[in-house]
């Protein structure tokens, strides 16, 4: 236990780990945004199957649109937050190296 208390974290390794996580979250956000239409259509298709193969067109459209919009919104928020975080972490690393 004492070796963990006395051990100071390596800043370069910590920075690399944070950047990897932020970039992966950014890519995940982009994938969610770009595939939101197909996710919405799949969700609507599943609902048709649950209802015995037929459904009102307006209900199908509502399910498809709302599901796609939800995934698009989550993807955009994830991409924005992780993108800004990656930029801030990169700028902080740049300032640290320059100083």
Image (cartoon, rainbow, N blue to C red):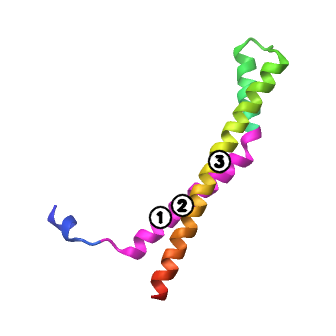
Residue hosting label 3: 75
User: Residue 76 at x, y = what percent?
Assistant: 66, 50
Q: Which residues are magenta?
A: 9-37
Instruction: Classify mark 1: residues with Cα within 10 Å, few (<14), some (14-19) or many (20+).
Output: some
Q: Which quadrant does the N terminus fall into?
A: bottom left
Left-right relation of 32 to 10: right
Marks 2/3: CA–CA distance: 13 Å
Give the image location of residue 13, x and y in percent: 41, 72
Which residue in the structure is indicated by mark 2? 22
Task: Name the secondary structure under disc 1.
Answer: helix
Residue at (47, 64) in percent of width and height: 18
The one nearer the camera, 24 or 70, is 70
Q: Residues within 10 Å of mark 2 (few under 14, many from 20)?
A: many
Q: Is residue 10 magenta?
A: yes
Name the N-terminal-most of marks 1 and 3: 1
Assign the C terminus to one quadrant of the image: bottom left
Residues under labels 1 and 2: Cα distance?
6 Å
Task: Determine whether 19 is above or below 45 in the image.
Answer: below
Q: Are marks 1 and 2 in contact (CB under 8 Å)?
A: yes
Question: Vertical placement of 15 versus 22: above or below?
Answer: below
Asked if the residue under mark 3 is in contact with the one under mark 1, i.e. CB atoms within 8 Å, the reply is: no
- Residue 8, above or below 35: below
What residue is shown with label 1?
Answer: 18
Local secondary structure at mark 2: helix
Outermost left residue: 2
Instruction: Please state if 72 lies on the left or on the right of 15 as rendered.
Output: right
Q: Quadrant of residue 23?
A: bottom right
Majority secondary structure of magenta residues: helix
Q: Position of residue 82 (x, y in %)?
A: 57, 58
Q: Going 69% across and 16% down the picture, which residue do you hit?
A: 50
């Amino acid at each position: 236990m004492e070796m963990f208390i006395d051990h100071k974290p390596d800043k370069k390794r910590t920075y690399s780990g944070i950047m990897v996580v932020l970039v992966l979250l950014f890519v995940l956000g982009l994938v969610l945004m770009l595939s939101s239409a197909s996710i919405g259509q799949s969700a609507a298709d599943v609902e048709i199957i649950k209802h015995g193969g037929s459904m009102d067109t307006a209900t199908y459209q509502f399910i498809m649109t709302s599901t796609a919009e939800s995934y698009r919104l989550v993807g955009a928020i994830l991409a924005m937050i992780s993108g800004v975080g990656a930029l801030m972490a990169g700028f902080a690393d740049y300032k640290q190296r320059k100083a």
